[in-house]
Image (spheres, rainbow, N blue to C red):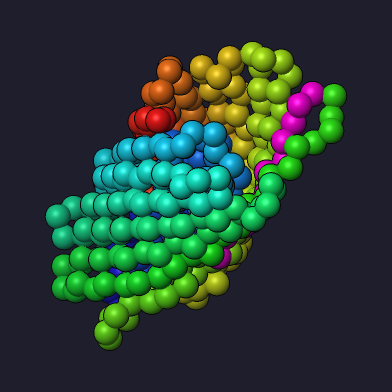
Amino acid sequence: MKQTLITLFALLCCSTLAAQESAMPTMDAQVLGMGGVAMSSTNDAHTLFNNAAMTAFTLSPAKLSASYYGQADFDYYGLSGYWRMGMKSTIQAGWRQYLREKANNDTAFDVGYTYRVGEQLSLALVGRYTHIKRPALKADALAFDLAAAYVKPLAWEHYSTLRVGAKLSNLGGFFGEADYHLPMAFKAGAAIETFFSDQHQLTVGADLGYSFSPKAARGFEAALGAEYNLMQLIQLRAGYHIGEKGTFNPSYGAVGAGVRFLHLRVDFAYLFAEKQSPLYNTYSISFGLDF
C-alpha cells in the first residue's frame, strides 16, 4: 500500500489523511477562523461545502465566493455559489482543486439542491464527482451528501437565533478496481446568534462529528468557535478544533477576521498547529460577492 499525505477537511473541518483515501476539504475562511464550526454557518456561498441546507435561511438571493487555502507544501483553490429560486428552493454549484507537488492533483465538482420545509426546517442533497491523480494511479468517484438545517428565533432579552445543522457526507465510492475509500462521516452542530444592539452581534457555535471509514481515519472530532460582528462591517473570530486522529484529523487553534463593504466580502483565517502537524502555518483567504 502506497502512503500519500494529502490535505483534507473530512466532515467539513480542516484535516489531513495519510493513506489511499481522498476527500476535498472546505477552504471557507469564516469556518476555519471559528475552529471548523461548519454545520451552522450561513454567511457565504461556501455553504455548499459546509452544510448546504443552511442556504435556505440566507438573506441574499444569490452569492458567489472564491477561496485559497494552503501553506508551503500544498495549494488548494475553490469556487462556489448559489441562486435562490422562489421562496423554497435553492440551487448550488462548486469546484475545488487540491495540488501537492506536480504528481498529486485532486479535483471535485459539486452540485446541490436545497428545499425549505416550512419556516424553520430545510433539507439538502449534494452530488459530487471527484477525480484524483497520483504518480501511478488515476481514479474517479461519485458520492452524495444529505444535510438538514433548523433555525428558530429565541425569546430572549436580546434578539437571538438558534441554528442547528447536520450532515451525512461522502455516501458513494470509486469506480473500477481502485483501492481507495471516500471518508464517510456524520457531523452535527449548533450556534446561537445574538444581537446586543444594532452595532454589536455575537455568534457562538460548536460541532461534533464522527468518521466511519476508512478504518485508519475512524474517530471523533469537535469544534468550538465564536464570532464578534461590529456594525455588520468587521468580524473577529477565534476557535479551537479537537481531532482524535492526529494525522487524518489534527487538532489546531484558529483566529480570523472579515470585512463587509456593500456587496463585497473578504475573510482571512490562520491556523495554529504543532510544528509536526500537516496544518502547521496553514492559512485561508476568501472573497465573496452578494447579489
Quadrant of the frame with the C terminus: top left
Quadrant for the N terminus, please. Answer: bottom left
Can you tell which quarter of the image residue 40 is in? top right
Q: Position of residue 107 (x, y in %)?
A: 26, 58
Q: Is 8 situated left or right of 209 in this image?
A: left
Report x, y in % for residue 48: 45, 50
Residue 274 or residue 182, whichever sits in front:
182
Question: Residue 190, relative to residue 44: is it above or below?
Answer: below
Horizontal arrangement in the rendering, residue 52 relative to residue 19 (left or right): right
- The residue furthest front is 86
Residue at 25% over, 66% down: 132
**Is residue 162 on the magenta stretch?**
yes
| Location of residue 257 in the rendering, given as x and y in whole percent from the top left corner | 48, 25
- The stretch drawn in magenta includes residue 31: no
Magenta residues, start to end: 158-168
Look at the image and tell me whether residue 212 can be seen: yes
Residue located at (55% from left, 45% from top):
87
Identify the main secondary structure in magenta: strand
Q: Is residue 78 above or below residue 288?
A: below
Residues 146 and 281: in front is 146
